[in-house]
Image (cartoon, grey):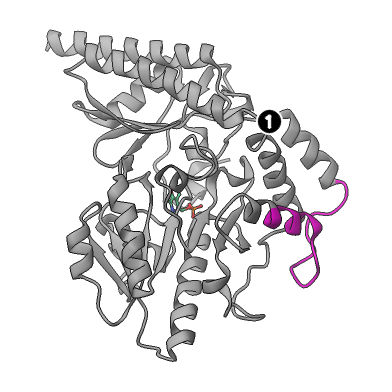
Amino acid sequence: MSLEDIMSTYSRTDLIFEFGQGSWLFTKDGKKILDFNSGIAVNALGHCHPHLVDCLQSQIKKLWHCSNLYRIESQELLASRLVASSFADSVFFCNSGAESVEAAIKVARRYSQTQNKNKKKYKIIVTTNAFHGRTLATISAGGQEKHLEGFYPAVDGFTRVEFGNISQLKENIDEETIAILVEPIQGEGGINKAADTYLREIREICNHRDLVLIFDEVQCGMGRSGRLFAHEMYNVFPDIMCLAKGLGGGFPVGACLATKKVSQHMTPGTHGSTFGGNPLAMTAANALLDIILSEGFLDNVNKSSRRLIDGLQRIIAKHQNVFLKLKGQGLMLGIKCIVPNSLIVDRLVEGGLLSVVAGDNVVRLLPPLNISYEEIDIAINIIDEVANRIEIDNVKK
Ligand SMILES: *Cc1c(COP(=O)(O)O)cnc(C)c1O
């Protein structure tokens, strides 16, 4: 066994987790760590939730994969549930966030090029600090130089404007523009919440100019914001939405949801995915929905969010040499730091709390959506202690 044998696309912390239980991870050498990373917003119900375990265990004895050349009941069920709980009329299933964004780009192009019988219409407006995945088209849409370096040429057709700047967006729309792609709450970019008016104005522009509005809710979707989908709190609805991360509760599932209007030209043969929508993945996502859609679940997410926000605000006010401010919504929170965010994340791991960095010198906190008050209080104490120690170290210097 050797880390050397893995292509080194990640710099890894030297921790090996042997198992997880609820909000906790246990290392091979017996260390217990509270998980406020959740596999980067993936383990929405923590680790090995009994309902997911039961559903997957019974499905694994029946059927894993059979291909989309045949009907898959669990896929039809999940699609119906997602359609019933959203603006959308149909769903394409894939296996990751990047694939769901790729699907969204294809649906938008197909709609515009078929409607207009014009191959020159393909430009999509994207924003600064965006993240949409690591395929060639999605690094081009994300536009971060650190993701593009060495991988040029970028995929053509993305026009970048400043996140939040509506007049710049308007100025950059031309005859070739077909769509606007934006995260309602930017995740990797540093937990940046779009302003109410921003998304509302974008929707109006899209209506007015017949542009397709795509929301990338890969990170902020599936209850993370305190609503099932983050755009609900803005009361602004897209034509296409990308989901993944939390959707399978830890199992790889991606989905691209769309209205009938924009997806009508996606006919047999226009897109596909061998693994997309397989029975195991669909079982995981259906089991996750059983819990997330159950009475009172999202209310509890909001109550937990309140408790975590109150605690974090107290600590941030107390340690003004370490932390600057709190950002985010629901259980998708970020602490903008004064000291380097990676230092905080490393110290938190030593103190027994897992978190993850984001852009803008932010430490991201993405606990399981079913986190308990007791666990929230433990996390707040660990963060407080880490900040205390950093302040003491700084005074000594
Ligand atoms: C993580 C993420 C993606 C990419 O998802 P992968 O499953 O890693 O391909 C896309 N968009 C957003 C907003 C994300 O947070």
Q: Quadrant of residue 365?
A: top left
Position of residue 388 relative to residue 360, above or below, is above
Residue drawn 87% across and 46% down? 61
* Residue 36 horizontal side relative to residue 126, left or right: right
Position of residue 265 relative to residue 52, above or below, is below
Q: Position of residue 369 (x, y in %)?
A: 55, 30
Q: Quadrant of residue 349?
A: top left
Residue drawn 43% across and 42% down? 233
Residue 46 visible in rendering = no
Q: Position of residue 93 (x, y in %)?
A: 63, 61
Viewer-side residue, 202 vs 70: 202
- What's the residue type where badge 1 is placed? Cys
Residue drawn 25% across and 53% down? 163
Q: Position of residue 264 (x, y in %)?
A: 58, 77
Residue 354 magenta-highlighted: no
* Residue 217 horizontal side relative to residue 168, left or right: right
Assess disc 1: are there few (<14), some (14-19) or many (≥20) residues with their C-alpha within 10 Å of its C-alpha.
some
* Residue 391 horizontal side relative to residue 262, left or right: left
Query: What stretch of residues is rendered in magenta?
Result: 61-80
**Mark 1 residue element:** loop
Please tell me whether the stretch drawn in magenta is mainly helix, strand or loop: loop
Task: Name, please, the residue furthest toward the right.
Answer: 62
Residue 74 magenta-highlighted: yes
Residue 201 visible in rendering = yes
Screen quadrant of the N terminus: top right
Q: Position of residue 327 (x, y in %)?
A: 31, 32
Position of residue 367 relative to residue 214, above or below, is above
Screen quadrant of the C terminus: top left
Residue drawn 55% across and 27% down? 299
Q: Kindly identify which residue carries mark 1.
A: 48
Q: Is mark 1 within 8 Å of ligand 1?
A: no
